[in-house]
Image (cartoon, rainbow, N blue to C red):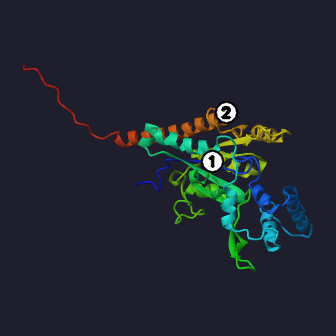
Amino acid sequence: MSRLFEQNRIAIVWDFDKTLIPRYMQVPLFERYQIDEAAFWQEVSVGSAALEAAGQRVNHDTFYLSVLLRYVRERKMSGLDNALLRELGSTLEFFPGVVEFFAASKAWVAGVPAYQQFDIQLEHYIVSTGLTEMIRGSVLAPHIDGIWGCEFLESAAPDGQAEIAEVIYAIDNTTKTRAIFEINKGVNKHHEVNVNSTIAEDERRVPMRNMIYVADGPSDIPAFSVVRKGGGRTYAVYNAASQDGRSFEQADDLRANQRVDSFGPADYCARSHTERWLKLHIGKIADAIVHGKQEILRETTRGIPQHFVEPKRSAS
């Protein structure tokens, strides 16, 4: 009986802000509308605290979306639509080597003959509390196999121009784990598969052991935990250019508390510490897949009758 999936896919699942880019992705949006970044986030913090004080439950990871929509309604961000978000996404600046690593890592896996034999491929996924359309507009988009982020539905503004008006999908730091299970079960590739369906571990498209989760901080602990528990690998990055050292300390704490397997600077250039670690473990996962496939082949062919040639007997 054939398996549902060959389990020959490797997935690196990435956080976005402070992992692949040094700043929050909303910065170009604030600059476009001349919004003070610190003041915006302060308003988000104060607003969510006020709602909680009034007895309301607030999702702190995604409350900023409500503030963005209010800014649009109040004309502080008039004309903001999904197309503009994609345009602003094209201005995002990445940590050194990010784009090159995404492309080169896929090409490297695809070019190893032993991996080619079993059609082993590397996939990159983004799971972010940020804005999906900005990621889609970035230079990294062509190298990404799937994005989980926050998305808006548009409607006509008073002047007839389309603007973002409603949140239609949101990811927070806890529901990132759902995205991981969707990748694990193949929901993103086969929509007939439901994330809540019971699927045996050896039938899932990307086993947890074939995953690497990369992020920068304690907010990703739920995702780190799910991947590690399933036998996957986890890695934290820090901004080496950070002046106060908190980014490094966060990553060190994650390692000390056994949330991640290792950590390093957010430098993905060839032969950097982080690039070497990721490539090493991509290779280890791929080698394990090859070994498993070869074992299946040996088991399948074991016991199959072979041609037997009788030795010639000398004349008596």
Please identify the residue farthest to the left as the structure is shown.
316
Please indicate, yes or no, whether residue 94 appears anywhere in the rendered image: yes
Foreground: 294 or 67? 67
- Against 173, is 224 above or below? above
Image quadrant in which you'd find residue 232? top right
Crowdedness near tag 2: few (<14), some (14–19) or many (≥20) residues, C-alpha within 10 Å: some
Q: Is residue 173 above or below residue 246?
A: below
Identity of the residue drawn at 51% across and 39% down: 108
Check the picture and name the quadrant holding the N terminus. bottom left
Q: Label 2 belongs to which residue? A: 273
Examine the rendered structure and indicate whether residue 152 appears above or below residue 216.
below
Q: Is residue 267 above or below residue 219?
A: above
Q: Would you call the spot at circle 1 few (<14 residues within 10 Å), some (14-19), or many (20 or more)? A: some
Q: Nearer the viewer, residue 244 or 299?
A: 244
Three-letter residue code for mark 1: Gly
- Is 122 left, or right, of 84 in this rendering? left
Disc 1 to disc 2, C-alpha distance: 25 Å
Q: In terms of image quadrants, where is residue 316?
A: top left
Q: Position of residue 198 (x, y in %)?
A: 56, 61
Q: Which of the labelled discs sits on residue 230, or is there none?
A: 1
Q: Secondary structure at mark 1?
A: loop
Q: Earlier in the sequence, mark 1 or mark 2?
A: 1
- Name the residue rendered at 62%, 34% in the picture: 276
Q: Residue at x 39, y 41 (%)?
A: 297
Callout 2 amino acid:
His
